[in-house]
Image (spheres, coloured by chain):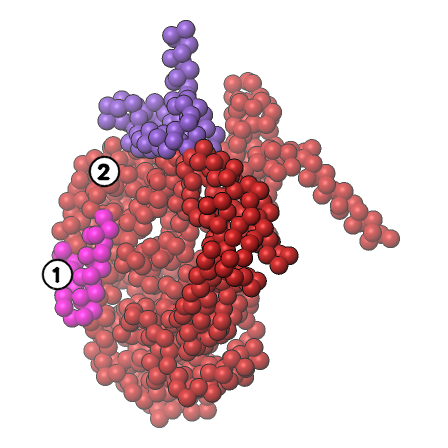
Chain colours: A red, B purple
Amino acid sequence: MEKHTLMITEKPDAAQRIASALDVQGKAKKMEDNGVPYYVAKRDKKIIVVPAIGHLYTVIEERKGRNYYPVFSFRWVPRYLAERGAKQIRTWLETISKLANDADMFIDACDYDIEGSIIGYCILKYACGNKEDISKRMKYSTLTKEELDKSYAELQPHLDFALIEAGRARHEVDWLYGVNLSRALTIAARDWSGKYATLSTGRVQGPTLRFLVAREKVIRCFVPTPFWSIKANVEIADSTFEAEYEKEIIESKKEANIILDACKGKNGEIEKIDIKRFQQMPPVPFDLGALQSEAYGLFGYTPMRTSNIAQRLYLDALISYPRTSSQKLPPAINYKAILKNLNKVSEYKKLTAELLAKPQLKPNEGKKEDPAHPAVYPTGNLPERVLDVSEKNIWDLVVRRFMAVFGEPGIRQSMKAHINANDHRFYLRGRQTLKEGWLRFYGPYVRSEEVLLPPIKEGQIINIKKIILEDKFTKPPPRYNPGSLLKRMEEAEIGTKATRANIIQTLYDRKYARDERIVVTDLGFEVVETLKKYCPTVVSIKLTQELEEKMNNIQLNNAKREDVLVGAVEILKPVVEALKEKEKTVGEQLSNAIKKSRLDERTIGTCPICKTGKLMTLYSRKTGKRFVGCTNYFKGLCKTSFPLPQRGTVRPLGKNCRGCGWPTVQVRIKGRRPWILCFNPKCPLKEERRKRIEMQNMRQGN
Amino acid sequence: MKCKICDRETSGNEYCELHARAYESIVKKYDEWKKALEISWKEYLSEIAKNPLTGEWAREVAEHLMKDGEEQNVAKG
């Protein structure tokens, strides 16, 4: 029987694309074995491309059971042995093993990063029967035919073992931290209260939650301070402009009133005009973090959502590999070819033509590098299917950023006129773009304001129409949002580009945090406070950074995986022992926080009828159905109750209805748009809505 | 000893660590308010208690101090 080459990819989409790119006719044959797809490509010989579905292997404890800790011995096993609901993995691995039997050459074609390398390594070692040492590696950053052809022709002779060792160490260290600390917290709370609730923390999750808690403390302790600011409405050439007083912050009302009295009814004279020109350099190419931040700022997409969209665009060969920390675009990616292809899109026609006419294309690169991949860039391929709005947005953003980095610097001019009114100075400011440069390429995503001033000259007398005194208060620091938290994690160098967005999501899933402008829940507070009190090292940012550095050193062949693991266990062991010793106290604190958090989840607001009780989600003993009732019912004081939808989730909004002031909840049912429910049957908004529908029906009837 | 506001354990003080921090913030900011508006401590507490920008714990402490002050006045009267 003819032997074939077996190629492993990370995802089915990538398998199909790679197989088609390598097939001489560009049409790989799709096959299936027990529902597992694989592709057969004909080239110099038969190539079978079989995909994984992400990680097929994971780490578990040597000894069975989940009700104990500490755990320091582990092994790698197929995921179906470790996770419920991963049964499909068994058939998947059986198919791969079967296909490996008749193979005489093995190629790891998973994404070229830590996760991809681990996925490929585990499959080659465990499912293919120790083929990791004879396997070759395909390295590519885009799924375009050209790059895949080149990558296949220039196969790396062996796997990148340094990357694999670093990846194994990361998985193992994170598993050790996660399993021991999470079990310590969960078991402590369960044993104290007798009720189970999953609590988790980890090497990166703990310090990330700590960032949030630190900010939350500042916000909750914040006391605003009053201050005043003064503005003048000035008239120039029949138009009114706003000038601000020389002192931005006036700290006492008395002083503010003195200034106001002195300037009222007076004309101003332009004493001086300062004009400054400055260059605005083009942006640097996107690394994943910058793309996630920009997409959050422009479209409100969470980092996780952007990462998923970018991954889809990568699998469609529209953009390069997104999980990169590089801000470099090497000439090898062929700038001209990409621009020429993008020139076929009407929106980019003029812009790409302008860049292609330049004698030399040189990107404005940033400092950050990634040994495995360049910055995110468009491949030049055009969509073969209709992109949804979010995919279109991210693709357009990547395309425009790519063009912008080749643009000339923009030239902006700022103008500041000093207006003297009775010896008090006001500043009138203008800003304009003199030369657009790269700003034109970045188009809709440029955030710069244009304030054009009419011609003015020194000595000119200005009519001050009105002086405005504004009462203000200092504001607390802003809450983190998923975008700014991701940036903070990047700055602190904790987590990796591939894991940060998931860690933020876990904080929401565990109910440690809520809302888009992140609010830490009491449970989140208690977890951090408990860890800080009994094992401060595990929420230490410094310790996490040190571990990250050690793991990076494995990748650079400067440290051994075994040594890093031993070091991690040495830190973890006393921590877990300390937690075990204080299990009762820890359990009590966490249980109280869980109880409060569960109560908060069910508390909707003050009862609008008796005004003293609280409206809560309750369950009928007879029917088991949920409804809203007043807590004063149990004291025999109030019988207020309202029905609730029996399907979906009901979340108290913490806001009162704008129509009647009654408490409200948000109802979410799968497949329907979430809606806000006010319990007041006589709410004026309901009445308005009813009338509107009646009118519509009448119109339709006519 | 329990915190007078939230029942958390304290290290022998009137407030828990979190409310103590809010109390410190209130005391520290009074000088700025006095300079800005020439107001008394009582007026200051009432102002910050109703200000929407005041943090949750600072508001709880301000309300507690106001209530405490009233109770002391009643006791003295």
Name the subunit of mark 2: A
Instruction: Kindly report the distance in space between the C-alpha atoms of the residues bearing marks 2 and 1.
Output: 29 Å
- Residue A339's place in the image compared with A614, above or below, is below
Q: Residue at horizontal 22%, vertical 56%? A: A545
Viewer-nearest residue: A267 or A475: A267
Q: What segment is highlighted magenta in the picture?
A: A540-567
Viewer-nearest residue: A288 or A244: A244
Residue A257 screen position, x and y as percent? 49, 35
Classify mark 1: residues with Cα within 10 Å, few (<14), some (14-19) or many (20+).
few
Q: Which residue is mark 2?
A: A533
- Residue A184's place in the image compared with A446, above or below, is above
Residue B10, by quadrant, is: top left
Q: Is residue A113 left or right of residue A426?
A: left
Q: Pointer 2 and pointer 1: residues touching (CB < 8 Å)?
A: no
- Residue B49's place in the image compared with A159, above or below, is above
Is residue A559 magenta-colored? yes
Is any atom of residue A196 visible in this view? no
Q: Which residue is mark 1?
A: A563
Q: Considering the image in quadrants, where does the N terminus of chain A appear?
A: bottom left
For marks 2 and 1, the one nearer the N-term is 2
